[in-house]
Image (cartoon, coloured by chain):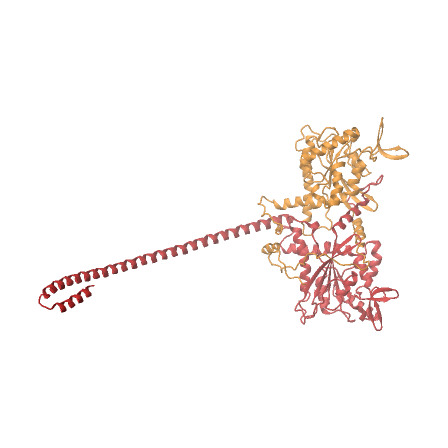
Chain colours: A red, B orange
Amino acid sequence: QNDGYRTLSLSGHVGFGSLPDQLVKKSIKQGFCFNILCIGETGSGKSTLINSLFNTTFDDPVSSHFLPSVQLRAQTYELQEGNVLLKLAIVNTVGFGDQINKEDSYQPIVDYIDAQFEAYLQEELKIKRSLFSYHDTRIHVCLYFISPTGHSLKTLDLLAMKSLDSKVNIIPVIGKADSISKTELQKFKNKIMSELVSNGVQIYQFPTDDETISKINTIMNEHLPFAVVGSTEEVRIGNKMVRARQYPWGIVQVENENHCDFVKLREMLICTNMEDLREQTHARHYELYRRCRLEEMGFRDIGPENKPVSLQEAYEAKRHEFYLEMQRKEEEMRQQFVQKVKEKEAVLKAAEQKVHTKFEQHMLVLQEVKMKLEKKRKVLEDEIAMFIEKKANAEVFQSQASVSTPLVSLKKDKDRKTYVLM
Amino acid sequence: PHIGPVESKNEAAMSELVPEPRQKPVVPMKPMGINANLLGYIGIDTIIEQMRKKTMKTGFDFNIMVVGQSGLGKSTLVNTLFKSQVSRKSSGWNREEKIPKTVEIKAIGHVIEEGGVKMKLTVIDTPGFGDQINNENCWEPIEKYINEQYEKFLKEEVNIARKKRIPDTRVHCCLYFISPTGHSLRPLDLEFMKHLSKVVNIIPVIAKADTMTLEEKTEFKQRVRKELEVNGIEFYPQKEFDEDLEDKTENDKIRQESMPFAVVGSDKEYQVNGKRVLGRKTPWGIIEVENLTHCEFALLRDFVIRTHLQDLKEVTHNIHYETYRAKRLNDNGGLPPMTVETEENHESNL
């Protein structure tokens, strides 16, 4: 444990015993994150339980049974107790177990959990990163609500839990447990646990390595799955108002340990093991995800010749690849651009040519019209000349004829001729 | 309200390289900050106790480096700080040993325990610093050592299968010993601190402060502070890392009044007024190390150990180490650095 370091004794008070306090002080300043995922069929009592656990009413609309697929709805709240600020995120599965075909029921949940891991991993891989101020959205605990049938687990339960047990801490709970009698309950619990064991489902075990809490944790481990009842209503018992459900045959008190395991759940989840849940998520589930993901991306710790390859070198290789790819793309784009310019140029040239041709055509037409007009004018001029000649002849003829004919008729003719000429 | 798929630019860049593109992730919204009214005690505040228990179980690492010319009382001071023989002087070092020709780096680790808290303390000594005739670049081996520790940590951190607790050998704190000349800082002091304040937390201390009177001390400290400021040397606690107003006021007081701490060290005890105290006996009186009217050792001890120990580690991890990592991942193998990132578009190292 000491790695070969000598242990020295102190000759006086140094003061580093305050280290945990210094560390805690910093954590308090930053606040704590805790993210709970609730999986269960619609109406299994998830929201009511969460409200009871945190002694408050979270704003959560009731969902319908007719959603086409499972969706995850996350809401975050800030709770303050003393000087502790808790950033609580409750993720609810909406529509779980409602579909006729439930094959795809748990895949969205797996994807969601993976997505939170992925987001963290992305931040961790950044060059300029800020992990200490990162808002952790990874799921720290999954409360799986088992329907209080009294018989056994449903196939969907087993499949869902099996696909999630290596990704998240699962705490199975029996919701609406006030519908089972005490004798039935123990049998039910035993059946569930044995089914989980025989199917190899790894649920979260409360840690037993710390002497101060190992005793209580061991006892609690025996009580799994917790049979819980939640309530948003209060009933007067004696002189106190307690959370309870009132029936004609009696009152089920939420915080009465004889009635249900609610207190145990709250104790385990919040007061004793919250920090361990967070640590397991980071040190075990996240590391597993990261390892798988990096291997998937082609990184190895040992290279092809069995020599250790640092992720560093793999990074460099990938970066180089990426850089070359970028260069290639840039070249491609440049080629495309040049090509496009050429094409446009050609098009413009063709258009220019066309315009030129048209212009010349127009000029020719103009020329022709001019010539025609010229011809017409010539013709007209000739006609005028002829007419003038005719007129002159007529005048000569007239002067000869005026001698022999009466004045009146000649005058008339003269007038007529004059009139015509004009 | 349910959350639809949100694609970040990072994801887009990633999916270009990854062989099988993954489904677009569903990311929850940022915290809404709805303050739910608690109607009764729940037990959230027990997390403090849970966390404290966890840290006590895992224990702490702390690595402190001492730099200064030989004879300034470095080893004695460290021994006094940790009330045990942690410095190399006591671990079999021969007092007659010659001063080395170049700066050497000697790290010695011990485990000490107090109040249920186990600390793995490593004291890194730098014999030979400033002792040559030509001291040019004598800070280089020290800078190299510090960067090597960052490198070691980085290598471990980027492994695919990595250890649960990465062994931390990074230097969390560097005590720089200033000679009590009473005049001003030496060029070597300035050069060292200029170079190293960018990679490690430097706490300057005035050694062997019993050679100065109170007025000389105050004036010297003022001059030193002025010189450090003029030369742009940011010693710990650095102004830019004050997290909030509370930190700032506390640290401002330390920066502008107390630092650099004028200290005296001793591992010998004497009787003073019926009490046994650590001190130095002189013909003109006994200098009590832990007496605030005699010297500022107690201030240094409280500062480094009782209030800012965790912060020293965090600044090393969150800032100095991150700076090293970013630089290292950015300029690799002479490849030109990628395009400068904006706030929205941090590209990953892939």
The one nearer the camera, B85 or A181, is A181
| Depicted A292 relative to depicted B86: above or below | below
In depth, the one of B98 and B127 nearer the eye is B127
State which quarter of the image contains the C terminus of chain A. bottom left
Which residue is painted at 36% across and 56% down in the image?
A353
Question: Where does the image place residue A34, in percent across and percent down from the top left?
Answer: 74, 56
Does A345 sit left or right of A418 as displayed?
right
The image shows residue A354 at horizontal and vertical percentages of 36, 57
Q: Nearer the viewer, residue A414 or B58?
A: A414
Q: Position of residue A219 (x, y in %)?
A: 84, 60
Can I make out residue A307 in this image? no
Which residue is at the far top?
Answer: B283
- On screen, A308 above or below A266? above
Could you tell me if residue A142 is visible in this image? yes
Q: State whether residue B51 is above or below residue B150.
A: below
Q: Quadrant of residue A259?
A: bottom right
Residue at (39, 57) in percent of width and height: A351
User: What x and y, as percent, mark residue A292?
Assistant: 67, 56
Q: How many marks?
A: 0
Q: Residue furthest right?
A: B274
Residue farthest to the left?
A: A404
Q: Quadrant of residue B266?
A: top right
Quadrant location of residue A399? bottom left
